[in-house]
Amino acid sequence: MKIRTVEYFVGEAASSLRRNSLMSFASVSTVALSLLILGMFLVMVLNLNLMASTLESKVEITVYIQDNLSDHDQREIGTRITKLPGVSEVTFVSKDDALKRFRERLGAQQELLNALGDSNPLPDSFQVKMDKPDLVKTTAQSISEFKGVENAKFAQEVIDQLFVLTRLIRIVGVVLIVFLALAALFIISNTIRITVFARRREIGIMKYVGATDWFIRWPFLFEGMIMGFTGALIAILLLIKAYGMFTHQVYETLAFLPLLPQYPMLTHIGVFLLVIGAVIGALGSTISLRRYMNV
């Protein structure tokens, strides 16, 4: 395609946007809002996945040891646990350390332990960290069968709910992304359809004098792509501003909460939104032109 021809197509698209400035503004604004919601949801899904992964990585199994085991037997249990698949770290917690931690957890309610006197009912234990959360259940079951182990416990309900929530977020994310993409496609398609309808006689004349279908299509394709691209650009700028304000507030109040940094996450999302915006604009134009090209 020659540069002069491209300039003609772009000029025609720009003229059409100016002639229908109100509709173009409404279309760009709606596309920007749709893609902004899509971008915000992508940011939310990515951050929730990070939080889920962080929580999953902190899942621990508490292995309680039977009383009166020798130091050799305790070390043997710890060694066997270390060799299990998915185990990243094994820490021995003596009954004295366990009682000390329990006292610290009670805080001002220390008097609850006064009835125990000098006795310590807490057993020795191992804290087992896993780098593969999906193996926690089977690993705990295996450890509970070791000789000298009283039982092995972990937050089964929390882990199950976490996995369900993660899967649900991904499914809802895919559904919402498809829905918003179709909504943006519908909006641009109808905006272009209004322009095409206003120029239907001109299109018919161009076809009668020998203009090819693609020569007629290109200005409308550029018009749709410009609207989609512009809407995506506005959505990206708003998304960057909103996420910057959000992370600033979170770090001031909940500094421990894991969040993805703005970059390169927003760079990748921005490129994705620009491509989606341009593609949706081109598809919307193609759909709108189909009826009027059969002259």
Image: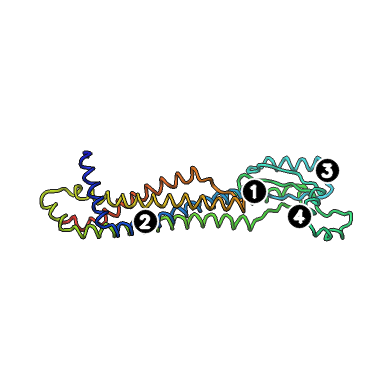
Which of the two discs, 2 and 4, sits closer to the camera?
Answer: 2
Mark 2 and mark 3 lie on one chain; the one further toward the N terminus is 2
Mark 2 and mark 1 lie on one chain; the one further toward the N terminus is 2
Give the residue pinned by disc 1.
Answer: 58
Which of the two discs, 1 and 3, sits closer to the camera?
Answer: 1
Q: Amino acid at mark 1?
A: Lys
Q: Give the alpha-carbon distance from disc 4 to disc 3, as whole Å.
A: 29 Å
Q: Give the alpha-carbon distance from disc 4 to disc 1, as whole Å.
A: 19 Å
Residue 83 rendering spot, x and y as whole percentages = 68, 40
Corner quadrant of residue 31: bottom left
Q: Give the SS element for disc 3.
A: loop
The numbered disc on residue 105 is 4
Which of the two discs, 4 and 3, sits closer to the camera?
Answer: 4
Q: Residues within 10 Å of mark 1 (few under 14, many from 20)?
A: some
Q: Give the alpha-carbon distance from disc 2 to disc 3, as whole Å.
A: 70 Å
Give the residue pinned by disc 3.
Answer: 70
Residue for point 17% across, 56% down: 294
Q: Amino acid at mark 2?
A: Val
- The answer to whether residue 27 is left or right of residue 243 is left
Label 1 with label 3: CB-CB less than 8 Å: no
Residue 252 rendering spot, x and y as whole percentages = 61, 51
